[in-house]
Image (spheres, rainbow, N blue to C red):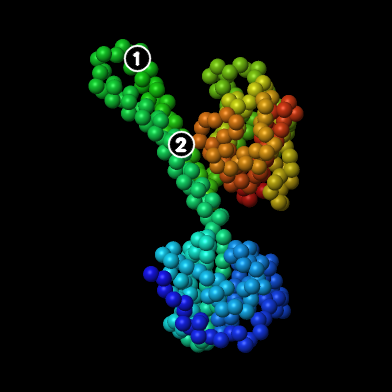
Amino acid sequence: MRVGTSSTLGARDVRATPAPRHGDLADLGIDPDELPDGLVVADEHGQVICFNAAAARITATPSADALGRRLDKALPLEDLEGRRWWQLTDPYGGLAIRVGQPERNLLLPGGREVLVSARYVRIHPTGPVRRVVVSLRDTEARRRTERSHAELIATVAHELRSPLTSVKGFTATLLAKWERFTDDQKKLMLETVDADANRVTRLIAELLDISRIDSGRLEVRRQPVDIGAAVGRHIQAYVAAGQPADRFLLRIEQPLPGLWADPDKIDQVLSNLLENAVRHGEGTVTIDIRPTASPREGEDTGTSVTVSDEGPGIPEESMNRVFTRFWRGSKRGGTGLGLYIVKGIVEAHGGTITVGRARGGGAEFRFTLPVSVPAYLT
């Protein structure tokens, strides 16, 4: 059942009062049209005296049509159950101790959702309402966040299901038919279980990293880091795994400034960038390490690491999405979370990371870290 229009607002006769324009607020040094959120202000009679450009955009109502009208007519809002919001809240005739309404989802005519909050301005704490100030926000940003969370859940569920199915299948088979398999068959099954368990462990670690990055709680435990030696260890691991040694070219420009960083997290960054170059790139993988200007104010020098390959590179239209969640490029595989985490780790160190096209045509990732020498050593 729909509830009728608020009797408080309806009882006001606002037609005799000329509609003031919201430009009057400029006397206070405020231009409502410059505000990013919708702003609607009604006077003590419930008459709209301010309807800024953002409010006009969000509600699809021209400001000229809203100014001078009753608030419930200029901004006809309903809750998600179809009840008229102004009748429910009754800002002018309700409890005298109320100061406003918290943000909530409401519906405009046509069913479009908006985020609405209201403030009741009184001269005295329990006096009559002199102004109702309403803030409007488009829900698109929140919907994007919700979609991102839903994608994350779906990705995690998909990535977990495959290795866990494998682990469950092999362990159940081994437990039921242990005697029927040869030692080589048992070893192969256990190696597969071990690899899938490692895959699950990596995914969980990625999720924890994302949680800490998004909440600003990613801890950086700084200590001296030999970045050249760290890259060398990764190259040796790839060569030991079967990659030709001449596929990697490491160039270090000396002298490098002393670098204080979290060695485990820097290893994570290097591992991800080198894996991308090896797996998705082609030709020689070149790693350049050199001193450069520090990205941190107050420091003269920093260290830059550039990882490039000779593959097809990243399409120009995808450059601005490389460090977002779930970006996988043209070749599918993985969770698409690695570069998002890399960016979070680099920025947690006070550094910067960029992506571009290498001279050989492939992808080029370059991150720069400040020296970050502890104050007690300077």
In-front residue for pair 71/30: 71
Q: At 55% across and 81% down in the image, what residue appears?
A: 46
Task: Give the mark nearest the N terminus, 1 or 2.
Answer: 1
Q: Is residue 109 above or below residue 201?
A: below
| Residue 153 falls in image quadrant | top left
Tell me residue 326's x, y (percent): 54, 39
- 143 shown above or below 175: below
Closer to us: 45 or 354: 45
- Residue at disc 1, secondary structure: helix
45 left or right of 193 in image: right
Disc 1 versus disc 2: distance between alpha carbons? Answer: 27 Å
Residue 197's disc number: none
Q: For mark 2, give the secondary structure.
A: helix
Mark 2 residue type: Leu
Q: Which three-letter amino acid code belongs to the residue tagged 1?
A: Gln
Q: Quadrant of residue 360?
A: top right
Contact, mark 1 vs mark 2 (Cβ under 8 Å)? no
The answer to whether residue 258 is seen in the rendering is no
Residue 203 is tagged as 2
Left or right relative to 193: residue 51: right
| Position in image of residue 192 (x %, y %) | 40, 22
Please name the residue shown 63% across and 50% down the image.
Answer: 375
Q: Quadrant of the N terminus?
A: bottom left
Instruction: Answer with the quarter of the image where residue 131 lies.
Output: bottom right
Mark 2 neighbour density, 10 Å: few (under 14) some (14–19) many (20 or more): some
Q: Say which residue label 1 marks.
A: 185
Crowdedness of circle 1 by 10 Å Cα count: few (<14), some, many (20+)?
few
Image spot of residue 122 (x, y percent): 54, 83
Q: Is residue 138 visible?
A: yes
Position of residue 249 relative to residue 68, above or below, is above
The residue under the point 41% across, 65% down is 81
